């Protein structure tokens, strides 16, 4: 079947529209004017976003009932309004001027799996790191709780590697906050050039490598 440009996407699998709606609701809750980039091709649609407060890209993908060619940046709130959960579909709103991050997306192919991690273990590590941040921030005297100090503390914590992997904890934090760490299937860690990716059945979090971190501990992974 010849692919066409579409103003509506229809998903092939049950629950995809509801999952997309939940994803968009979180984005809009954190940033009212959030934008997302939609790319569709080869029978799959991907919605890319950069959640506010997280230095990562988040991706939700879904199989389409019919092949479509589409590449557009839209307002997340407008896209949310056009989700049709009962029809497993979503309308495509008018394009907007995209933020700078939307011009530099991770590659579609070339991903190599290098580890698998239990999702509950990733979630536990992320929750522990959130707790550490709050505890250390609360111990700071009021005169030291400036934005710059808190940002430096967050950077220290979220730049740590996830166990013995190269993936920074910021990716686990984002996956936890976005509701991607569910189910019983393990989280799959992949790499492609300068990019690292944490993928679950509910979505992916992608980050650019900053520098090769030292070995970490405390989380068991199964290397490929």
Image (tube, helix red, strand yellow):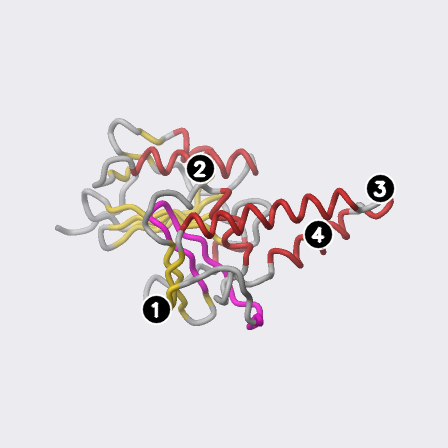
Q: Nearer the viewer, mark 4 or mark 3?
A: 3
Spatial CA distance of label 2 from label 4 is 26 Å
Q: CA distance from mark 4 to mark 3?
A: 15 Å
Residue at the spot 27% in from the left edge and 53% down from the top edge: 41
Q: Are marks 2 and 3 in contact (CB under 8 Å)?
A: no
Q: Measuring 48% from the left and 57% from the top, which residue is drawn there?
A: 103
- The C terminus - image quarter: bottom left
**Callout in the foreground (2, 3):** 3
| Mark 1 or mark 3, earlier in chain | 1
User: Callout 3: few (<14), some (14-19), or many (20+) C-alpha neighbours within 10 Å?
Assistant: few
The secondary element bearing badge 1 is classed as: strand
Q: Please report whichever mark, 2 or 3, sits nearer to the chain's N-terminal start.
A: 2
Residue 70 position within the rendered picture, expressed as x and y whole percent measured from the top left: 31, 49
State the SS at label 4.
helix
The residue that mark 2 highlights is 24
Q: Which mark is residue 134?
A: none
Would you name the residue on which mark 4 appears? Answer: 151
Residue 12 picture location, percent across and down: 21, 41
| Secondary element at image label 2 | helix
Q: Residue at x 52, y 40 (%)?
A: 34
Residue 158 in the image, given as x and y percentages of width and height = 60, 56
Where disc 3 sits, the SS reads helix
Query: Looking at this view, is 49 or 132 the one in front?
Result: 132
Badges 2 and 4: C-beta atoms under 8 Å apart? no
Give the residue at mark 1: 112
Residue 201 among magenta residues: yes
Cα distance between the residues tagged 1 and 4 = 32 Å
Q: Classify residue 2 as left or right of residue 45.
A: left
The range drawn in magenta is 196-214
Residue at the left extreme of this rendering: 1
């Amino acid at each position: 079947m010849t692919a066409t440009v579409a103003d509506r996407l229809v998903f092939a699998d049950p629950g995809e529209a509801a999952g997309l709606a939940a994803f968009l609701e979180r984005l809009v809750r954190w940033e009212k004017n959030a934008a997302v980039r939609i790319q569709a091709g080869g029978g799959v649609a991907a919605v890319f976003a950069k959640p506010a407060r997280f230095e990562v890209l988040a991706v939700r993908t879904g199989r389409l009932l019919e092949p479509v060619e589409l590449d557009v940046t839209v307002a997340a709130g407008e896209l949310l309004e056009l989700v049709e959960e009962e029809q497993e579909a979503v309308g495509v709103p008018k394009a907007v001027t995209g933020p700078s991050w939307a011009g530099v997306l991770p590659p579609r192919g070339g991903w190599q799996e290098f580890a698998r991690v239990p999702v509950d273990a990733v979630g536990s590590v992320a929750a522990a790191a959130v707790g550490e941040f709050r505890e250390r921030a609360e111990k700071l005297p009021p005169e030291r709780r400036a934005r710059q100090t808190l940002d430096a503390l967050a950077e220290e914590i979220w730049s740590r590697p996830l166990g013995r992997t190269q993936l920074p904890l910021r990716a686990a934090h984002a996956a936890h906050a976005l509701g991607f760490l569910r189910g019983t299937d393990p989280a799959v860690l992949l790499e492609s050039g300068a990019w690292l990716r944490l993928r679950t059945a509910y979505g992916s979090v992608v980050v650019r490598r900053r520098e090769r971190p030292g070995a970490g501990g405390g989380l068991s992974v199964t290397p490929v």
